[in-house]
Amino acid sequence: MYEQFFGMKQTPFVNSIPAKDLYASDGLTETLGRLKYVVAHRLFAVVTGDVGCGKTTAIRRFVADLDETKTTCLYLSDSKLTPRWFYKGLLDQLGIESKFYRGDAKRQLHQQLEIIRGVHGKNVVTIVDEAHLLAKETLEEIRFLLNYRMDSMNHMALILVGQNELWDKLKLQRYAAVRQRIDLKCELPQLDRSQLEAYIAAHLRYAGCSQEIFTDTALDEIYTYSNGAPRAINKVCTHSLICAANRGKKLIDEHLVKTVIAGELP
């Protein structure tokens, strides 16, 4: 397809790009630094951002940067996560068969966390993605988990990741007890115009493309359409590359981008 036409060795605007090759904006770099602090001190953090702003990609980069000899990472992403399945999901990743009752499963998890920390000397971080979809019961259970020992540090670091509505939910009075336990909040910003240009250039470099493909005015149109959201940038760039290859055009200008946006994108 278009990769061959433009002399690319890899597909540039996909989610499967290795974490080390991902573009690191100032906002992403700051968030990664703060999350490393969260793990080191076993804190409770919330990461939010607009739809398509790169939250899951940021977490993928964060996990890739963790030292596996010092940290055990557990990851959950389930919009219908109940307290029982919360514990089962974590225990499954630790290779432990979960007991049926929630209280028993909770005690199992605490035992495993103590072994990982006390015997193996490793920190544990649990990441819950799509957390804006969690029910109140599950969020409350997370708070109870962190309240296991009032006189000591948490047994693990916990990071909730979700759309901006997660923080809107947590600001409600009925979630006050959960909100008061949060140690750190990170909000991933959209890319600005200069960062968008650097983002696209980084993805093209990853693909092995040395020549310039998008004109400055094309980049302006992409920014206007995407508002700096990486998911939307990926979409319009991919469609533009396909269209350009079909037309035999090596340079993508604003007219082609406008045509793609008007005819192919919502």
Image (cartoon, grey):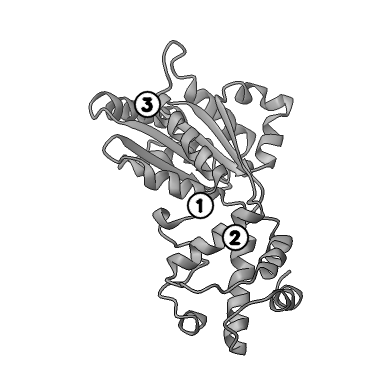
Depth check: give the residue in front, 9 or 176: 9
Looking at the image, tell me whether mark 1 or mark 2 is earlier in sequence order.
1
Looking at the image, tell me whether mark 2 or mark 3 is earlier in sequence order.
3
Q: CA distance from mark 2 to mark 3?
A: 46 Å
Q: Which residue is mark 1?
A: 57
Q: Are marks 2 and 3 in contact (CB under 8 Å)?
A: no
Q: What's the residue at 40%, 58% (across, down)?
A: 18
Q: CA distance from mark 3 to mark 1?
A: 29 Å
- Within 10 Å of disc 1 (Cα), the crowding (few <14, some 14-19, many 20+) is some
- Residue 64, placed above or below residue 265: above
The disc label shown at residue 197, or none: 2
Name the spot of residue 66 as percent of width and height, x first.
Answer: 36, 41
Name the spot of residue 191 as percent of width and height, x first.
Answer: 63, 51
- Residue 199, placed above or below residue 42: below
Q: What's the residue at 50%, 50% (across, down)?
A: 24
- Residue 52, placed above or below residue 216: above
Which residue lies most toward the top here?
Answer: 151
Name the spot of residue 65 as percent of width and height, x first.
Answer: 38, 44
Q: CA distance from mark 1 to mark 2?
A: 18 Å
Name the spot of residue 203 as percent of width and height, x first.
Answer: 50, 64
What kind of element bears circle 2? helix
Q: What's the residue at 54%, 29% (across, down)?
A: 141
Q: Which residue is mark 3?
A: 110
